[in-house]
Image (tube, rainbow, N blue to C red):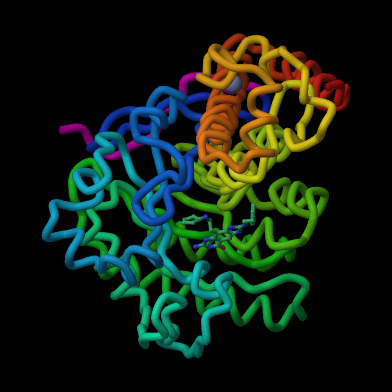
Amino acid sequence: MSAFRWVCESTEGRARAGFLHTAHGVVPTPTFMPVGTVGTVKAMTMDAVRSTGAGIVLGNTYHLMLRPGAEKVRALGGLHRFMDWKGPILTDSGGFQVMSLGALRKLDQDGVTFASHIDGSKHRLTPERSTDIQHALDATITMCFDECPALPAPVEAIEASMRLSMRWAARSREAFARREGYGQFGIVQGGTELGLRAESVRALTDIGFEGYAVGGLAVGEGQALMFATLDGTVPLMPEGAPRYLMGVGTPDDLLGAVERGIDMFDCVMPTRAGRTARAYTERGTLNLRNARHALDTRPLSPDCDCLACTRHDRAYLHHLFRANEMLGPMLLTWHNLAYYQRLMRGIRAAIVAGDLAGHAGRLRAGWASDDW
Ligand SMILES: Nc1nc2c(CCNCC3CCCC3)c3[nH]c(NCCc4ccccc4)nc3cc2c(=O)[nH]1
Ligand SMILES: [Zn+2]
């Protein structure tokens, strides 16, 4: 069994191409991680997820602790067996989901108490409890229990929240059961304040983790401020450890963040868009409910190997969404995930070939063309 580690293969500027070695296999980076919510990537079978080229998927601690419950998943053999996914699984720590679901909650120095959005039952998450739940799920990568402040917020609030998250990071690390090939990631906080971001990176590297995430972003600050924060934060993060930008993003976000040194991403966009008739392509996005697609027999993307592009066309997808057929969201989710994986593979190959700058220019020109 090999130790959990990230190996750099090639760099161009601050961008890196490498391999993440885990107990559940090796994954090339940069990588996009499809979001599995309640033990499933919505509208997808795991074979379909695998066929898109995904290497790591996300599990959702918050949902799974409420239903079916972490102890049941442990008794059933853990999330890998439960959802039939043999590759690495990363689970978030649940705090962000509690806040973003707006569930009735109370935050204190020790943790967060909240009411389940499913049946109103009371629950409590602390750094220890969150770490134990992720262990019960048999997560390959465990995230620290943190607090993600909503932006904009007064600097004092961002500072207090970041320092609370750093105290929780130490408790999360204390509660983490070390296992060969498994890892735990610290989460850098500090809003868009570069001084606070630097203090957070120092606090986490003093504790020591197998990887480091940039949290507290993609919460309404906008792309320019997100990139500016990365410019001031990523160079301070350990070069030999994987870097994960949480909750990001659009194809343009992914490209810009890879150029700024990020290796791992997760976002609900491709799957959520797939369910709402929005297609991602090399030429921008399409709303397939629009009547202009009714007689268009072209595939979504000419060089896409997904089922929607090899066996069907835009006219058929348009019909499925107009008819509210469940095959619509299934095929379009498949396409969007396949597009995101193809995008990451192309970016990685460009870094290895030393032509990320040229490739980035061609990608941005295509997205700007927005031709149908
Ligand atoms: N622990 C933690 N998680 C964060 C997350 C959740 C990442 N996805 C987790 C998956 C695990 C299960 C579900 C998600 C974030 N997601 C976003 N933005 C999402 C923005 C967005 C919203 C809606 C649509 C598209 C993008 N910022 C985030 C910051 C943090 C953070 O600081 N700490
Ligand atoms: Zn496709």
Prevailing secondary structure class for the magenta stretch in the rendered image: strand
Tell me what residue is drawn at x 54 percent, y 25 percent. Answer: 338
Q: From the viewer's perspective, is residue 356 above or below residue 290?
A: above
Q: Residue at x 26, y 63 (%)?
A: 176
User: Which is nearer the eye, 2 or 105?
Assistant: 105
Q: Residue furthest front?
A: 323
Q: How many marks?
A: 0
Could you say which is closer to the camera, residue 363 or residue 308?
308
Left or right position of 139 against 205: left
Residue 281 percent across, percent down from the top left: 70, 25
Residue 341: x percent and y percent? 53, 26
Q: Residue at the location (68% across, 72% down)?
A: 150
Q: Observer-nearest residue: 358 or 75?
A: 75
Residue 285 magenta: no
Using the rendered view, name the quadrant where residue 201 is placed.
bottom right
Residue 12 image position (x, y, % from top left):
64, 22
**Where the C terminus falls, by quadrant?**
top right
Ligand 2 - quadrant of the structure image: top right
Can residue 257 be seen here?
no
Quadrant location of the N terminus in the rendered image = top left
Task: Name the residue at 52% across, 68% down.
Answer: 96
| Horizontal arrangement in the rendering, residue 190 relative to residue 171 (left or right) | right
| Residue 251 makes an appearance in the image | yes
Q: Is residue 17 above or below residue 123?
A: above
Residue 360 drawn above or below residue 290: above
Q: Is residue 222 left or right of residue 244?
A: right
> Measured from the top left, where is residue 268 in percent x and y?
57, 48
Magenta stretch in the rendered image: 1-12
Which image quadrant is residue 371 in? top right
The answer to whether 130 is drawn above or below residue 31 in the figure is below
